[in-house]
Amino acid sequence: MEETLAELRETFKSRRTRPVAWRKKQLNAILNLIHDNEDLIFKALYKDLGKHPTEAFRDEVGVVEKSVRDSLSCLEKWVAPKKRPLPLVFFPARGEVLPEPLGVVLIFSSWNFPIILALEPVIGAVSAGNAVVLKPSELAPACSKFLKETIPLYLDKQAIRVIDGGADVGEKLLNLKWDKIFFTGSPRVGRIVLTAAAKHLTPVTLELGGKCPAILDTISNSAEMKVAVKRIAGGKWTPHIGQACIAIDYVLVQEHCAPTLIELLKKSIREFYGENPKDFKSISRIVNKHHFERVHNLLKDPEVASSIVHGGSVDEEKLFIEPTILVNPPLDSEIMTEEIFGPLLPIITLKDIEESIEFINSRPKPLVIYAFTKDEAFKRKVLSETSSGGVTFNDAIIQFICDSLPFGGVGQSGFGRYHGKYSFDTFSHEKAVLYRNFFPEIGPRYPPWNAFKLLFIRLIYRYDYVGLLLLLLGLKRY
C-alpha cells in the first residue's frame, strides 16, 4: 500500500492529472466503462443484492451516466478562476479564486449502492484533478471484484487505483497519510475514519445517513393523499428494500389520519410486490445473514412485535424480510433509536402535526426530512425550526439525483457535501489569489501627525472609497 501511495504521489507531483484534457479523458472512460459493461454490472448487483436490472439502472448505472455527462459539460467552467471584487483601498488590483486539486485522495464506498457510491465520488475527484485510491465495500464482493478488474482497463492506472479487501485493509489504508478521505457508511465506522484522519490532520467528508423521518400532514383531497402515501411507500421500500441512507425510516402522522395512511400503504405494497412479496422476483434481499439477523432482531422485542399491523414474515434462507408496517412501537426500543436500514416502517401518531417538529428535534439530526403538506406556514416552520442535511417537500428520494443541489448530512448524519459541482468543490482547494502592480507607489508628501493615523485607518476600513482618496492624496502609507 505504501508503494501504491508513493507511486500516486509521484504521478500527482508530475502534474499529470492537472490538464483538463486528462480529466475529460478519465470521465469519458467512466462513461465507456458503464456502457460496455452494463450487463456485467447488472449481474454483479443481482448476485450481491438481488437487484433487478430496472432497479440497478435507475439507482446506479443511470445515475453514474447522468453525473459524468453533467461533469463533462461543466468542467471548463468549474476549473476556471473566478473573479472576485476587491475594496477600492486595494486599487489598482484584482482578485480571484483558483480551484486546485488536493492531491492523492482515498474513497471508501458502501455496499448498498456499490456502483454509484464508488463512482460518484471518483467522478468528483477526477474532475478536480486528483489522484485516487478507491476502496470498495467487501460486503458487495461481486461488485468489488468488478470494479477491481474493470477500472484499470479504462482509467489511467498511474493515477487511479482500486484496492479491495476487508476491514483489515481499510485499517491499513487509514494509517497512511492522504490529502482527503471520503467515506460513505455507518456512524460507527465514520468515527474510526475521523479518528485516523485526525492523526494527519486530513480533511474528511463523511456520508453517514441516520433516521430520516417523513411528516404526513392532513391532506383533504383524497387523490393527493393517495399520491403522498404512494410516494412515502416508494421512499421506504423501492430504494433497495429500505437499505438506503435516504430511505424513509419512520412516519409522523396525526391520529385521525393514521388508518387512511395504513390502508393506502398496504395497497401500495400490493401494487409494488403483489399479494406474496416473497415470491416477487424483482424485490431486493437483505445484503447478508448478519444484517438479516440485525433487522429481524428488531421485531423480536414483544412490544415491537405487538405493534405490527402488516407484514412481519421472514425467510432466512432467502434473506427476505417482508415489507412491514408498525404503529406506535415503544419510542425507547431499538427500532426507534437506531437506523433501521431495512423494510420495517414504524408509524408514530401525534395529536397535532406540529408536534412533529419537537419529535424530530429531540433526536439526532437526520440526513433528510420529508414533509408532505400543502400548508405553506408549516413548510416554513419545518425549514426554520429543524436541522437536517436536506428537506424535501411532497416527495422522497428524488433529491439524490439532483446534481444542482448539494447532498450531505449535518451532525450525526455526516458532514461535507457532494454531487455535481459540489463533488468538484469537495475534492478541490479554493486558492485565494491577489494581483497588484508596482505602480503607482505614492509615498506620503509629509509625515502625518500621529493623532491623525488612527483616524485614517478607521476611515479606510469603514468607508471603502476613502481608501482611494487617501491613496491619491499620498496619505495611504505612514
Image (tube, grey):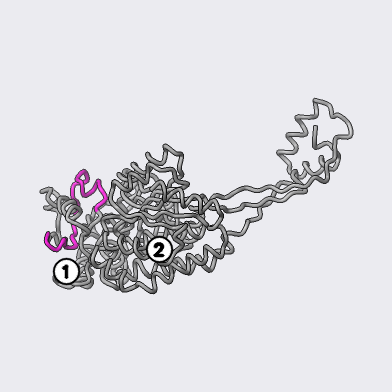
Horizontal side of 260 relative to 202 (left or right) equals left
Q: Residue at x 32, y 64 (%)?
A: 146
For marks 2 and 1, the one nearer the N-term is 2
Q: Residues within 10 Å of mark 1 (few under 14, many from 20)?
A: some
Region rendered in magenta: 316-340
Camera-near label (2 vs 1) is: 2
Q: CA distance from mark 2 to mark 1?
A: 40 Å
Mark 2 near mark 1, Cβ–Cβ under 8 Å?
no
As for residue 329 lying within the magenta part, the answer is yes
Residue 405, position as x, y percentages in the image: 46, 60
Residue 66, position as x, y percentages in the image: 44, 69
As for residue 52 lying within the magenta part, the answer is no
Look at the numbered disc 1 and give the secondary structure of its residue.
helix
Residue type pointed to by label 1: Pro
Q: Residue at x 40, y 61 (%)?
A: 119
Q: Residue at x 44, y 60 (%)?
A: 157
Residue 197, position as x, y percentages in the image: 41, 41
Residue 164 picture quarter: bottom left
Residue type pointed to by label 2: Pro
In front here: 315 or 456? 315
Q: Residue at x 74, y 34 (%)?
A: 457
Look at the numbered disc 2 and give the secondary structure of its residue.
helix
Quarter of the figure with the C terminus: top right
In front here: 357 or 457? 457
**Residue 400 shows in the view:** yes
Q: Which residue is mark 1?
A: 277
Return the mark for residue 268: none
Instruction: Name above or below for residue 238 compared with residue 368.
Output: below
Return the mark for residue 152: 2
Instruction: Name above or below for residue 61 compared with residue 6.
Output: below
Residue 302, position as x, y percentages in the image: 10, 48
